[in-house]
Image (cartoon, rainbow, N blue to C red):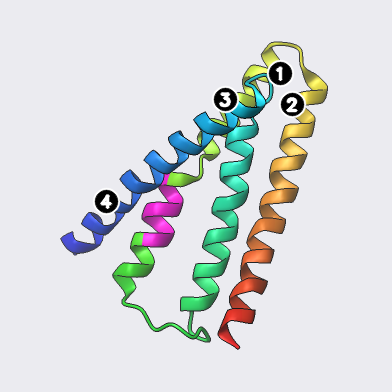
């Protein structure tokens, strides 16, 4: 049981560092007035978890140990994606009176993250063939 917690711990550290790094790069490139970094991290994280879940699931082409699934899906993807940051950034947009931007961020995050996980699943299905 402790090995599973270790997998989550190490994976979350990797995912968190990846999130911080990519968000910073995106913010530097595009700017910080809109939370593009978090949006892109959440979309790519949804894509990654969609692919990995499908490829390593019961019908997938990769048979991996349960702890590897926990490491990637709970640890890395959980540490990488940031719903709490999304919520805080949305609240900050609302508090600053940026109603359109906050609404656009909510819609874009929901829509594109769902599309990301769906595309990840489709990619996994294609890889499985």
Q: Which mark is residue 10?
A: 4
Quadrant location of the N terminus? bottom left
Residue assigned mark 2: 102
| Quadrant of the rendered image containing residue 6 | bottom left
**How packed is label 1: few (under 14 Cα within 10 Å), some, or many (20 or more)?**
some
Region of the chain picked out in magenta, as a range: 72-79
Q: Give the alpha-carbon distance from disc 3 to disc 1, as whole Å.
A: 23 Å
Q: Are marks 3 and 4 in contact (CB under 8 Å)?
A: no
Q: Predominant secondary structure in magenta?
A: helix
> What residue lies at 19% left-to-right and 62% top-to-bottom?
3
- Frontmost of labels 4 and 1 is 4
Say if mark 1 contacts mark 2, CB within 8 Å. Answer: yes
Q: Quadrant of residue 106?
A: top right
Please report whichever mark, 3 or 4, sits nearer to the chain's N-terminal start: 4
Q: Quadrant of the C terminus?
A: bottom right
Label located before the other in sequence (4 or 2): 4
Location of mark 3 (residue)? 28
Residue topped by disc 1: 94
Label 1 sits on a secondary structure element that is helix
Task: Locate residue 74, reporting x and y percent.
Answer: 40, 56
Element carrying mark 2 = helix
User: Where is 91 relative to 79, above or below?
Assistant: above
Residue 111 in the image, given as x and y percentages of width and height: 75, 49
Residue drawn at x 60%, y 25% is 89
Task: Check the image and report above or below for 82 versus 125.
Answer: above
Q: Tell me how far mark 4 sits from mark 1, CA to CA.
A: 35 Å
**Residue visible at 75% across and 41% down?**
108
- Asked whether disc 4 touches disc 2, contact meaning CB atoms under 8 Å apart, the reply is no
Above or below, 75 relative to 66? above
């Amino acid at each position: 049981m402790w090995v599973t917690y270790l997998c989550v711990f190490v994976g979350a550290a990797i995912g968190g560092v990846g999130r911080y790094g990519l968000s910073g790069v995106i913010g530097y490139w595009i700017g910080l007035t809109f939370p593009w970094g978090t949006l892109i991290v959440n979309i790519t994280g949804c894509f990654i978890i969609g692919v990995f879940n499908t490829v390593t699931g019961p019908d997938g082409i990769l048979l991996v140990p349960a702890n590897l699934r926990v490491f990637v899906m709970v640890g890395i993807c959980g540490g990488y994606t940031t719903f709490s940051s999304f919520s805080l950034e949305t609240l900050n947009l609302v508090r600053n009176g940026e109603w359109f931007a906050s609404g656009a961020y909510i819609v874009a995050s929901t829509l594109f993250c769902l599309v990301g996980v769906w595309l990840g699943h489709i990619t996994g299905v294609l890889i499985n063939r």
